[in-house]
Amino acid sequence: MTLLKRLLQRLGGERGEGASLFEPRMPSVEAGANLAAVFAQARATAADNERPAAGRNVVIVTPGRLLMMQPCPPPGSMPETQVAGIKKMIAPEPKRTIVAIAYTELSALQRDLPKAIPFIGMLMGFAYIGHAVCVFEGDVAALAYGCSEADLVIVDGAMVPFLAPDWATIVAGAMRGREIYIHDRATFKLQRWQAPS
């Protein structure tokens, strides 16, 4: 494969083997980044309560290890019926750190974020009511760093085949809490992860 072809694939310009831009897969990630620092910054940014009037953000750590902010609706702007539905899923107190493992290919995020991460609306709702929400791709080198200090982890079910075979052990060992859920794209439901017996 030529250098140009590899570069185009990495930048999302040319997709090899007919793969769709939105077909979940493990994206190529930036090697050599200080992962501890990147994810510490992502958590701090997601938890930022300094600017409540400006609204909160879901923080997406891109494969290039940049932080992409997805703004939530301004405080008080969501209908109370929607907020009540979010609160049924997760109480606003205590404040929690929520990590999602999802498809984060930058070109897909830029073109159609909800198509790349179908449950982004749910994550934005969690952030809207005050939780710190971060998203990343789940690359094996970043898995423990990305899930560090998480109270709850949500994994896109379509990404599970691309995670390390022992992903759940790594995640459970890194996180503060013990709640791991799988998001089913077909039913749009969360199911608590259970170790295979």
Image (spheres, helix red, strand yellow):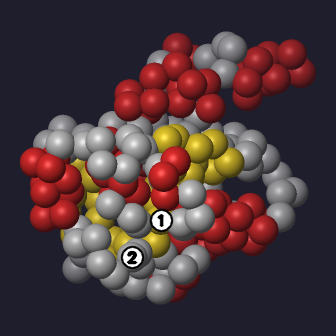
Type of residue at label 2?
Answer: Lys
Q: Label for residue 132?
A: 1
**Disc 2, SS:** loop
- Using residue 46 as the reference point, say whether residue 78 is left or right of it: left
Q: In this view of the protein, which residue sits in the foreground, 145 or 95?
A: 95
Identify the mark nearer the N-term, 2 or 1: 2
Q: Which residue is mark 2?
A: 95
Mark 2 neighbour density, 10 Å: few (under 14) some (14–19) many (20 or more): some
Mark 1 neighbour density, 10 Å: few (under 14) some (14–19) many (20 or more): many
Looking at this rendering, what residue extends furthest in the left direction?
81
- C-alpha span from label 2 to label 1: 8 Å
Q: Label for residue 173?
A: none
Q: Quadrant of residue 160?
A: bottom left
Q: Quadrant of the C terminus?
A: bottom left
Q: Residue at x 30, y 78 (%)?
A: 93
Q: Residue at x 49, y 41 (%)?
A: 71
> Does residue 102 show up?
yes
Q: Residue at x 89, y 21 (%)?
A: 3
**Position in image of residue 178 (x %, y %):** 36, 83
Q: Residue at x 46, y 72 (%)?
A: 97
Label 1 near label 2: C-beta < 8 Å? yes
**Position in image of residue 180 (x %, y %):** 33, 71
> Does residue 196 show up?
no
